[in-house]
Amino acid sequence: MLRRLVCCIGLVLAGLASVPAAAHAGFSTPPGATWTQGFIRQADGTTLHYDLLRPKGLPKDARTPVIVSIGPYFGHAGQTGPAGPVEGTSYDPLGTPGPSDRFRDVVEGAKLMERGYAFLMVDLRGFGGSNGCLDWGGPGEQADVKAAVEWAASQPWSTGKVGMYGKSYDGVTGLIGGVSNPKGLAAVVSQEPVYDLYRYLYADGVRYTNSLLTPALYIAIDATGFALQDSSQVLLNNAGSVACYPGDYLAQQSDVHDAPFWKARDLIRRAPAAKVPLLLTQGFLENNTKPDGSFDFFSAYGGPKRAWFGMWDHVRGNDVDAEGKLKMGRQGWFDEVMRFFDHHVRDVPLVDAPVDRDPPVVVQSSDGGWRAEPAWPPADATDVVAPLRDGSYVDDAMNAGTSEVAAQGLLAGRGRGVWTVSPPLPHAAHLAGVPRFSADVAVSRPFANLVVDLYDVDPAGSATLVSRNARRIDRSGRHDLALYGNDWKLPAGHRIGVLVTGSNMDWWLHVPTLQTVRVRGATLRLPFLRHTREAALPGEPAERLKAYRERAPFTVDGETLAAATDAAFPVPPAQTPPPAAAATSARPKRAATPRLVVRLSRRSTRRVVVHGTAPTGFRVRIAVRQGTRTIGRRTVTAKVGAFRATVRVRPRGRGRVRAHVTATRGRTVLRARSAALVLRRR
């Protein structure tokens, strides 16, 4: 339960003076890295603390691309404060301060130091070593993201190109970066974020179970995110946050979606303005950062975008279970992440990261199979509009949506409300997209609860929840509700079940009004695929999918099913094979050509730096020439699509020099030269 309440949203910035720091066993510096920490001072007076990891042995002015992560979890005492032992994260407020281990899996698993990246971890305002008031993704934290990225891009040790990486709260800060387009930001990887911060605590006026405790837990993380041996500046910054706590907590208790506080934290509205390439993950079965608004955001996102969507909960692409099996079920997360970063942050040509290896969208469906899609929801998802039965329910908060939490059986029933059920499907159907409900709802007083649940009902009457959502009804009239998106296959013989009710006790804190709520003229738009799909990509079922199929279903009695079955319920048409590929007369696309780009810069009168892009593994021979005379040579091997070499030169007086480069692998030979550079011999 704590994990469900503690993880999620955020933002922060980086610093000014670099201060060498020691490490300790709990938060030690990763192998091959050098750790420094420092601060950034913003125009509004906020001072943001950062930890910086750079490849060991690099000169101070050696330029590297930078991966930035900004969030509340980088304090030197541990990611989640005293909740660490319960959360499975480190917590040691008494030890010698060291860099956070939150993304050590990325640093080591993706080999960031070996690949020549710097990794910058920035505390959000109010957290860790940063001062100010925590802002729950608001204007202050949004300013922090912009400042952190632009600071990282402007440092003398930076190439000027920055990527962002995060999950949950620091996944949200990545989305903030994506929609804000700060200078220098070249790519964002965001896993299981929130797209509209209101929707992490509320569903259109109905509180989620975490709405009261989560704000308090972030205050606790804020208050305990420092180590007692941290610098005096860190301790002073942290102490100043105490005065913010009452206002922070109360601001998040507004359940009005259109309140100015929440409008400023709605990233879906800003998605069309995004220009930064995005790699996103979202679980259809997320039990923490729910998929509410996920696909509206993804569809509207204006920049280049890719995604993994599937049947997992709040996990990272590389997370494994106790037996070492991937929780999402698909190999290659770090490989794909680094191809994404290498291409956008290091300008590695796509010949080294073929598009067919990394489809625009990778989807895991309810049968555990994986496939590629050019977009999601898919273009051939066509709405079937199902009229629902009229009826009424008592708003008594006594219904649960699944059987997952056994204790709820003592408090509530399941399947209580107004059912509409289809006849058994004569053929298989594949739901892929966001179901949308609309109805005339009559209430006698405000604050009524409305919940809509979509079920897959098997021939034995076992109902598995496929989608849901809730809203508060304050007045009678027409009300619309978008349910959570999903990619769910219904076998032939199964039924589509729709339940209109007053509660899902397993997700929401419903306050019962005990009034009778009447629903008339209801419809549910269900997006079904016209064409069949094959599980053409390697991968296993997600860990969450297996558990969900075992624990979530409950049995709907035969009498209820018989009474609710509507013979006129529109059955989705039978799927047909995908249309044939484009006509063979169409001109095929040209294969990407390996690219060699050379740049030359001066380091001193006796040394120059030759760098650029070259296909990985190519042998790069460098000749620095002054006129027709060669004044320096060097040979290196291109790594991850780039090369860099310092060349000793012996120029004759003042003259223009160029770097002439030949890159070879097998029979492939590439040649290029740099622009001219003027050197003067002293």
Image (tube, rainbow, N blue to C red):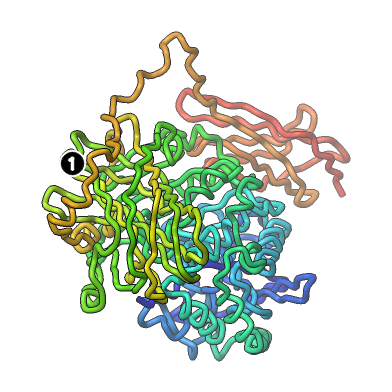
Q: Is residue 52 visible?
A: no
Quick one: 318 or 439, which is closer to the camera?
439
Tell me how many marks there are: 1
Give the image quarter of residue 402: bottom left
Quick one: 148 or 523, which is closer to the camera?
523
In the image, 231: left or right of 220?
Answer: right
Vertical side of 326 occupied by 385: above or below: above
Vertical side of 312 occupied by 279: above or below: above
Q: Residue furthest top?
A: 585
Residue 120 rendering spot, x and y as whole percentages? 59, 64
Give the image quarter of residue 430: top left
Residue 35 rendering spot, x and y as whole percentages? 57, 71
In the image, 592: left or right of 321?
Answer: right
Quadrant housing the N terminus: bottom left
Residue 520 rendering spot, x and y as whole percentages? 39, 52
Q: Residue at 34% across / 30% down in the picture?
A: 530
Vertical side of 322 occupied by 538: above or below: above
Q: Is residue 83 visible?
A: yes
Q: Residue at 24% across / 48% down in the picture?
A: 421
Mark 1 highlights which residue? Answer: 424
Q: Residue at 44% across / 86% down in the picture?
A: 82
In the image, 58: left or right of 33?
Answer: right
Q: Residue at 60% across / 43% down in the picture?
A: 303
Residue 510 rendering spot, x and y as whole percentages? 40, 73
Give the image quarter of residue 400: bottom left
Categorize mark 1 by other alpha carbons within 10 Å: few (<14), some (14-19), many (20+): some
Amino acid type of disc 1?
A: Pro
Vertical side of 154 occupied by 644: above or below: above
Quick one: 563 or 636, which is closer to the camera?
563
Q: Secondary structure at mark 1?
A: loop
Quick one: 364 or 29, which is closer to the camera?
364
